[in-house]
Amino acid sequence: MKNPAQLVFNAVLLIAVAVLYFLHFNQRPAAKAVPAAVATTEETTPADTTASAPATEEAPAETPAVAEVPAGPAPAAGAIVYVESAKLLDGYQGMKDARRSFEAKAKGWERQNQALVSSFRNAVEQYQKTAAGLTPEQRAAAEQQLQQKQQQGAVEQQKIQAQAQEAEGKLTQTVLESVNKKVEAYGKAHGYKMILIAAPSGTIAYGEKALDVTTPVLAYLNSEYRKK
């Protein structure tokens, strides 16, 4: 059987793990780099740009207009251009709204987690108050119950973590699918042969700044998002 000191240590460990997990979970980006969207030079109108967005992309009541900053002549039709994934996702209002929605859910999971931790900690404190008056058999039984409660709490914490990870994955996939469709429509409308993704990991080692269409694409994404 574990002694009271060990049980208290485990309670503190549960708290530490919970806090570290949720701090990490809330601070990291909700999405990875956008997959490359490829458009042919075929002259077609943007496909399905007015289709309804996934449920997680709810348009805000008031969203300030994103002005397109001129950066010289736009690349000609048939060009291979690129966008910066981090800048695109950080500036996309749909991603901002999705992150806020996820953070609200994360707070709920954190409350569930803290409730588990508090329940176990209270049980340990109650045991410590009464342990001196218990027989060896009673203490052994009480410690056994605490160990079972600790194990049950750990199982519940794993369920919460799995639920959070699943929700994050769905949110990421939903937003990226929407972004990719819009980027593809933008590429077709401008006759670009291909739109590549410049990510911090080094997908594109070098690209002429004149081929960077991040700003106009971002303005287009936010404009389409505000229509929803």
Image: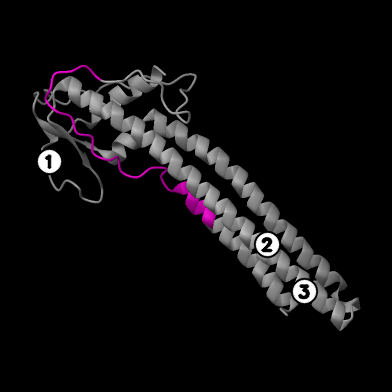
Say which element carries label 2.
helix
Give the residue type that dot 1 points to: Gly
Q: Earlier in the sequence, mark 1 or mark 3?
A: 3
Pair 1/3: label in front? 3
Rendering quarter of residue 172: top left
Question: Does residue 106 appear left or right of residue 205 in this picture?
Answer: right
- Give whichever of 62, 82 is nearer the camera: 82
> What residue sits 46% from the left and 34% below the top?
98
Colour mapping used in the image = one colour
**To which residue does mark 3 refer?**
143
Position of 199 relative to 89 (above/below): below
Disc marking residue 194: none
**To which residue does mark 2 refer?**
152
- Residue 157: x, y in percent? 61, 57
Q: CA distance from mark 3 to mark 2?
A: 14 Å
Q: What secondary structure predominates along the stretch shown in magenta?
A: loop
Q: Which residue range is magenta in the image?
A: 21-46
**To which residue does mark 1 refer?**
207
Question: Does residue 197 appear left or right of residue 193 in this picture?
Answer: right
Quadrant of the image containing the C terminus: top left
Question: Does residue 94 appear left or right of residue 15 in this picture?
Answer: left
Pair 3/2: label in front? 2
